[in-house]
Amino acid sequence: MGAGTLLEAPPVAPPREARGTRLRPARERAFWPFLLPALLVYTLLFVLPSFYGLWVSLHSWAGPGSEMTWRGLDNYLALLRSEAFLRSFVNTFVLAVAGGGLVFGATFLSMVVLRHLKGRAFIRSVVFLPMIVSAIAVGAAVGFLLNPKGVVNDALGWLGVDAQPWLGPDLVFKCVIGGLVWSTTGFYIALMMSAVDSIPAHVYEDATLAGATRWEQFRHITLPLTWDVFAVAAVLWVVNSLKVFEIVIAFTTGGTPGTPPLQARTAAVQQYVSVSMNGVPELGAGAAMGMVVLLVTAVLIVLVRRVTRRDRVELS
């Protein structure tokens, strides 16, 4: 046996990363068959309708059977000059911010209080009940309670307090926000409390032995360990608040034909009014509103994700 043979190095197994690199294309090919059905449904139900809506927004169109006339960006420029659209857009933004503050304020308070209660499962079920009721029913019920001859004003009369114009221009939108907060808060409480329940009890026991108050435990334990769920909940709130429609219609019209007052209109309601309540449908203008709301929604989602982005906190 020669010296060259003795000095020859034994064969070396390929690096683990190299083997993983070779397997990666195979894994990706196996992944696509499972992803394609969802992509197909998403394309058919969202992507293609979005492009069609963009095309319609560049035209003046009264619907099937009528001629589609090219307008370019005129529909979008008209929105900037429309007092009704600008007011509805501001209302939508106020609802998202003010309503979100109330919803998550109540949710965070519940995360502090409910964790220490023995009957927290029952309480969570009770506060979740309004979410089961349809938005139309919630709006109609709130409108019935707050109408000039409703139960609330009757109760105020028994207490010697003058009846309040709840459906008047100064209070109607505040009542809409209140009804929306009441009907949706239970969902976010249930969502966040499910994340709280996943935190081991010994973490809070150790913090209690160390002298941490409930607020300190919430700030340094509960919130960091449930932050990922909160980030998802914030995105869900943004999306849902920008498309509020049914509760406004039912609350302000009582289920009867009519136009909601301008003070209570959201962008979705204004889109409905412009399309179907002015005699001749303006599908081009309605599509332009939809595209603006879609763009604003996408921008807000990106902003919320950036604001809520944090390093993941894990228990050691």
Image (spheres, rainbow, N blue to C red):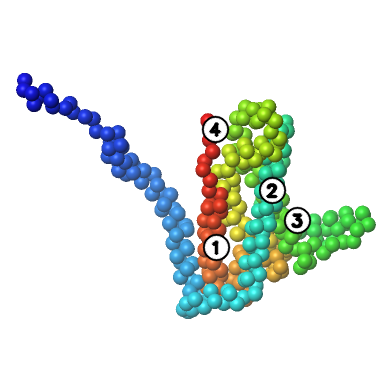
Q: Nearer the viewer, mark 4 or mark 3?
A: 4
Q: Nearer the viewer, mark 2 or mark 3?
A: 2
Badge 2, how many Cα within 10 Å: few under 14, some, many 20+? few
Secondary element under disc 3, as helix, strand or loop, is helix
Q: Amino acid at mark 4?
A: Leu
Q: Nearer the viewer, mark 1 or mark 4?
A: 4
In the picture of the structure, the residue carrying the numbered disc 3 is: 142
In the picture of the structure, the residue carrying the numbered disc 1 is: 296
Q: Nearer the viewer, mark 1 or mark 3?
A: 1
Residue depicted at 57% across the width and 55% down the height: 239
Residue depicted at 47% across the width and 57% down the height: 45
In the picture of the structure, the residue carrying the numbered disc 2 is: 105
Give the mark nearer the N terminus: 4 vs 3.
3
Give the mark nearer the N terminus: 2 vs 3.
2
Q: Nearer the viewer, mark 1 or mark 2?
A: 2
Secondary element under disc 1, as helix, strand or loop, is helix
In the picture of the structure, the residue carrying the numbered disc 4 is: 315
How far apart in space, not on screen, are marks 2 and 3 (Cα)? Answer: 22 Å
Badge 3, how many Cα within 10 Å: few under 14, some, many 20+? many
